[in-house]
């Protein structure tokens, strides 16, 4: 094929593909590929068109951002076009942007930039005449949008009448309508209970809600609006800075983003980017980057715009939280309690800032819900530090060789039968401690920091010890000899002797840690502490009936049953006898000891100078407090060191008491 027609074909194919995605995204609120993949297609088309400007067609998707308005809403022509934003995907591209602007302005000094989180919502225009909301419209393609007045009127953060006075006769405010995450989760949860269709993400939920022809439906949706600029303004001298204009709008009753800052120069901008990227997961709403705008309006005017985007603004995109990749296969992992977790093996993909090659598929119901097959193209999501998961299948890309995922009937490790109890989502291997996988996980748990804290007994070593047949239970750990250990990978005489000393040292423990280390189902650290306090001795816990177990605070019927089953099983009795004869001991617990913080829930967050978080937690527990992992309305007090982050924000939002390290130490001292 001649070069010329090859390129034209490539252009046409790209445009067709993008148009199809546009239709699904804007019109159907049902995107089939992640935003990042879409952005890449657009970039590819833009690059190609830049090389061959003679073949740019008027109907190319690069020539309008957005899609045509739907039937049912009347059209609105924006008197001042709503521009689009250029993107930058790296610090390098940001530096290039800044250099370009300063070059154009012939300026050496740093520029002041307004920094705003880029909300992932729907851009809208609100028109006020004599202070009264007259019309709300979507951005549409920037030139023509849809009249959604009756829908925007239902949104509480949009003033129907401006506050104060002295506003321009005609004022067009522009901003983003979005659905905060909490509202989205609640909405989807309700839809799920009523077996209705779920929204893929908050952005599509916001778009779908705004596109309702019946505004009573829109009124039920938790939408918010945050403004980022003005359009048409008649007979009014606006302030000379973008940030001052937004502050003025705030005074008239609009919401502006509380994270907005002014940065002096590109270095500041990049620091702000890092700051907000770290905060991203704890924000109440989704953002997909930062918008940087030259703050000085006179400079904005000098810079002007190219095609449909201002030269003076740019969106620095965050790493995408969703990406597409191929499902290569599924492994079935066996956990400590025998729970079988299907894990997707993926073609490695960069998502949420790291390369991901495994993602959880949770359980067999989830595989059914997703309708996923091996060799499918799937969307993987990794947000914050949350473990990556497969969120949906791209059915359009299903290959001919897609094959069904078969959930095994027998344990892949020990071949015991896998069972799934009625009413439970989890399938379990019935092999118990005869299953090498459960044994390994149980030993890892026993040795872990919050349990027996055995230095030098890491996961890899536990696996070797079991695989080599050196141990068949935790009790065997305590009769290991240096001679048996030497010869294992990375195990010289010195480290073997150290490990044996650490095993020896671990025998001096506390009753709660000992109970926790046993790995009884549903018995976490907090429950172990409650049990120890209530019964004060191991014998009494072992002998307790279900009724007496239920008297313990935090112990419900399920936990009581698990405890009872555990202590009734002969292998548990052997385990306990073995550990006690190996020499485990703990200080007696005085039943009558006063517990001044009894019933109070504390949370410890951030770093403390005088002790680690684990010690801080233990000191609080000794005083009777319960220590939780996250802040909720039930939290009595948050002990916050530097870096307390989202827990601190949450505590402040909920009005929970917060104390710093000095106050914390004073509290401990008071009860010494
Ligand atoms: O938060 C946003 N999504 C946002 C979007 C923002 N904070 N600022 C924006 N500024 C502009 C310009 C500079 C063109 C006035 C925008 C958008 N535009 C925008 N939203 C959708 C298309 C363009």
Image: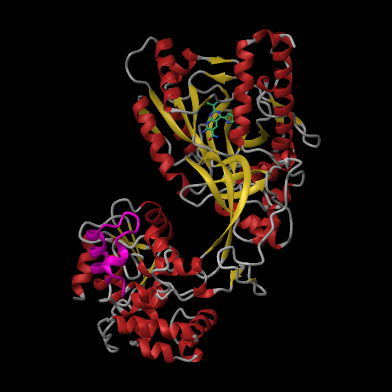
Answer whether residue 309 is magenta in the image. Answer: no
- Residue at (51, 84) in percent of width and height: 565
The quarter of the picture where residue 99 lies is: top left
Q: Quadrant of the C terminus?
A: bottom left
Q: Is residue 374 above or below residue 107?
A: below
Name of the residue lying farthest toward the right: 71
Q: Can I make out residue 337 in this image? A: yes
Residue 440 in percent (x, y) is at 45, 66
Q: Quadrant of the N terminus?
A: top right
Q: Can I make out residue 602 in this image? A: no
Please state the total of marks drawn on the protein image.
Answer: 0
Residues in magenta? 479-503
Residue 473 in percent (x, y) is at 41, 74
> Observer-nearest residue: 91 or 116?
91
Residue 384 is left or right of residue 54, and the answer is: left
Residue 138 in percent (x, y) is at 67, 33
Q: Main secondary structure of the magenta part?
A: helix
Residue 495 in percent (x, y) is at 25, 59
- Residue at (51, 80) in percent of width and height: 562
Which corner quadrant of the figure contains ligand 1? Answer: top right
- Residue at (52, 14) in percent of width and height: 304
The quarter of the picture where residue 275 lies is: top left
Answer whether residue 491 is magenta in the image. Answer: yes
The quarter of the picture where residue 343 lies is: bottom right
């Amino acid at each position: 094929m001649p070069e010329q027609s090859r390129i034209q074909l490539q252009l046409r194919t790209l445009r067709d593909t993008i148009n199809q995605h546009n239709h699904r995204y804007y019109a159907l609120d049902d995107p089939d590929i992640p935003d990042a993949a879409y952005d890449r297609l657009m970039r590819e088309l833009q690059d190609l068109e830049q090389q061959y400007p003679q073949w740019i067609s008027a109907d190319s998707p690069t020539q309008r951002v957005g899609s045509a308005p739907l039937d049912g809403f009347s059209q609105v022509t924006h008197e001042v076009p709503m521009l689009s934003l250029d993107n930058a995907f790296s610090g390098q591209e940001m530096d290039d942007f800044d250099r370009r602007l300063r070059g154009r302005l012939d300026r050496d000094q740093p520029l002041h930039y307004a920094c705003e989180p880029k909300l992932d919502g729907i851009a809208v225009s609100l028109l006020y005449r004599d202070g009264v909301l007259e019309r709300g419209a979507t951005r549409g393609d920037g030139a023509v949008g849809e009249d959604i007045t009756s829908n925007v009127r239902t949104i509480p953060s949009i003033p129907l009448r401006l506050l104060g006075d002295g506003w321009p006769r005609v004022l067009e405010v522009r901003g983003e309508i979005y659905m905060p995450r909490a509202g989205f989760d609640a909405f989807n949860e309700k839809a799920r209970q009523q077996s209705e269709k779920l929204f893929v993400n908050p952005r599509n939920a916001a778009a779908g809600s705004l596109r309702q022809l019946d505004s009573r439906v829109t009124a039920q949706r938790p939408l918010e609006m945050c403004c980022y600029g003005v359009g048409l303004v008649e007979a009014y001298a606006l302030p000379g800075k973008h940030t001052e204009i937004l502050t003025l709008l705030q005074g008239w009753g609009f919401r502006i983003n509380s994270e907005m800052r002014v940065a002096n120069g590109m270095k500041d901008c990049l620091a702000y980017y890092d700051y907000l990227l770290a905060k991203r997961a704890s924000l109440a709403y989704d953002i997909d980057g930062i918008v940087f705008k030259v703050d000085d309006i006179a400079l904005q005017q000098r810079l002007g715009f190219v095609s449909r985007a201002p030269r003076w603004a740019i969106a620095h995109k965050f790493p995408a939280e969703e990406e597409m990749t191929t499902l290569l296969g599924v492994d079935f992992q066996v956990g400590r309690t025998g729970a079988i977790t299907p894990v997707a093996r993926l073609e490695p993909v960069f998502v949420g800032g790291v390369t991901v090659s495994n993602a959880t598929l949770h359980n067999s119901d989830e595989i059914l819900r997703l309708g996923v097959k091996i060799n499918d193209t799937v969307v993987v999501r990794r947000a914050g530090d949350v473990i990556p998961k497969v969120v949906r299948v791209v059915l359009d890309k299903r290959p001919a060789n897609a094959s069904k995922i078969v959930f095994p009937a027998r344990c892949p490790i020990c071949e015991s039968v896998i069972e799934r109890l009625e009413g439970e989502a989890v399938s379990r291997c019935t092999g118990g401690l005869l299953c090498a996988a459960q044994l390994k996980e149980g030993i890892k748990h026993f040795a872990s920091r919050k349990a027996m804290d055995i230095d030098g007994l890491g996961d890899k070593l536990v696996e070797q010890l079991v695989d080599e047949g050196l141990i068949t239970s935790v009790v065997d750990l305590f009769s290991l000899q240096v001679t048996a250990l030497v010869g294992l990978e990375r195990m010289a005489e010195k480290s073997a002797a150290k490990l044996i000393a650490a095993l020896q040292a671990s025998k001096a423990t506390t009753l709660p840690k000992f109970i926790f280390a046993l790995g009884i189902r549903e018995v976490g650290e907090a429950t172990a502490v409650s049990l120890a306090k209530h019964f004060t001795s191991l014998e009494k816990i072992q002998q307790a009936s279900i009724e007496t177990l239920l008297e313990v605070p935090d112990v419900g019927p399920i936990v009581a049953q698990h405890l009872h089953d555990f202590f009734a099983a002969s292998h548990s009795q052997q385990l306990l006898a073995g550990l006690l004869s190996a020499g485990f001991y703990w200080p007696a617990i005085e039943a009558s000891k006063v517990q001044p913080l009894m019933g109070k829930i504390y949370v410890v967050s951030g770093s403390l100078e005088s002790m680690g978080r684990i010690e801080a937690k233990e000191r609080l527990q000794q005083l009777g407090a319960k220590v939780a992992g996250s802040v909720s309305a039930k939290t009595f007090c948050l002990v916050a060191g530097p870096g307390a982050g989202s827990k601190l924000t949450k505590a402040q939002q909920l009005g929970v008491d917060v104390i710093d390290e000095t106050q914390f130490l004073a509290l401990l001292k008071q009860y010494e």
